[in-house]
Image: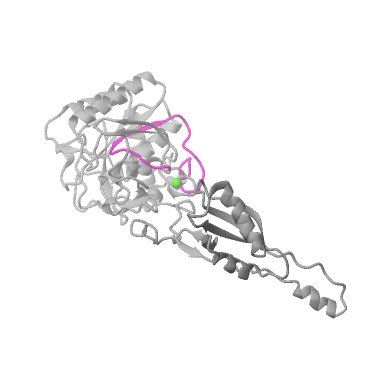
Amino acid sequence: MCDFAAWPLACFVPVTPPDDTETTARAASDEAKKGFPPAAPRRRRSGSYVVRLRPATAGGAHGHRRLHSLVRAHGMRAESLQMLGDSGHTFVARLRAADRAHSRGSAAARLAAHPEIERLERNVTYRACVFSAPSPASSQRVDWGIQRVGASLSSTKSGDGQGTAGGNVHVFVLDTGVTHPDVAVVEDRFFLGGSASDENGHGTFCAGVIGALDNSSYTVGVCPGVPVHNFRVLDENGAGTLASLVAAMQAVLAWRAANPGTPCVVSMSLGVPAPAWNMLDGLVQSAINDSGIVVCVAAGNDGVDCAGNSPAHVPEAITVGAYDSSDRLAPWSNWGPDVDLLAPGANILALWPTSGPAASADGGDPAAGVHTLSGTSMATPCVAGVAALYLSRFPRATPAQVKSALIDAAARARDSGQNPPIDLQGRAGTTALGVWAGAF
Ligand SMILES: [Ca+2]
């Protein structure tokens, strides 16, 4: 691909237009000799030129008149003659030979040699020096995880190129920000310095797993087109603070209080080792028990029991571990009795910022607007998307009912053979159930 940074000007290559050398009346004469009635002489073609008068020649209106005069003196007519901007001495002209006795090409060459003319050049066509890049609008890619959890069987049939999540469910993505045209972002807020823009890519990716639009571009989410609240709590390095998370959760609670009839889901692909209960854990618990908000959290990527991670160890939250495309628990996925469901988390394809500092970072492909990543961070939004799907059909369900419904649906799909159990790789005491979107 053409690297514009390395080719600021050389990227534009002048292209000579098709030869428009004037056609003479020879064809008509030949036909006359053969006894045909003489046809009308073909119209002499004009050509576009850029002409610059020497600085010593008066410019502006005087230059305009002078150039007309010089054109006529050289056996041509100017069909149009316009000054370029306010240059005074540079004009663009369409010139044509005045009669058959003159050839425009040779007349123009003589004009170019006139002492009052500094330059006279064909007005050639320039084209951008760009190779065709993968067009994100030409196709939509459906990740293996979307297929694996039966999202194509859900009420919105992810991947069929149409369909938006029904109902009035809202999803809050507490992450590095969400910056992508394939996500229906309805609110941008930031709880760190800076702005709500995603300068890391992680938040955009997670939002894509939840709800990338089911259209002709980029990827598709589990709950396509669901309204997303972009709550930026992590910085460009993917790091945030307890304070930023507490502030964001308080804002979610305030939104819920103002919109009591609107079901909502919080997705948090983040965590910190925390053997003890902390303020965020208390807010998550309150959001679930007191405010009716479904909260999905990542188990973590340390390959340990997630009982020592916040907010993964909040019992009421839906805590998510990760499996790979061979239906094996990922070796780095946290595990243990606090894990409620597993979801695809290895080599997941989802959205990536197309511009800004994150676009080319971490191996992302800004031209494609997608990226492949692994982690329980990728698995968590899959479950958040399924929860949103469920709430779009059963908007009055409590968080406890949503959690039970997701687990029951996963078990039924396992029993029917649609949703194979996950190989736990020896991590006994962890659920082997993968989330199943196909029921909703
Ligand atoms: Ca899409």
Magenta-highlighted residues = 154-181
Residue 267, picture quadrant: top left
Q: Nearer the viewer, residue 37 or 324?
A: 37
Question: Where 353 sits versus 29, above or below?
Answer: above
Q: Which residue lies furthest to the bottom in this view?
A: 34
Q: Which of 127 and 254 is in front in this view?
A: 127
Compared across the picture, whether 430 is left or right of 53 comes to left
Residue 16 screen position, x and y as percent = 54, 66
**Rendered-image quadrant of the N terminus:** bottom left
Residue 39 in view of the camera: yes
Residue 317 screen position, x and y as percent = 26, 32
Q: Is the magenta stretch mostly helix, strand or loop?
A: loop
Residue 264 screen position, x and y as percent = 37, 29
Residue at image coords 85%, 72%? 38
Compared across the picture, whether 11 is left or right of 103 comes to left
**Colour style of the rendered protein structure:** one colour
Residue at image coords 20%, 45%? 334
- Does the magenta-highlighted stretch encompass residue 180? yes
Residue 122, picture quadrant: bottom right
Residue 328 screen position, x and y as percent = 27, 54
Q: Which of 236 and 305 is in front in this view?
A: 236
- Does the magenta-highlighted stretch encompass residue 436? no
Residue 433 in view of the camera: no
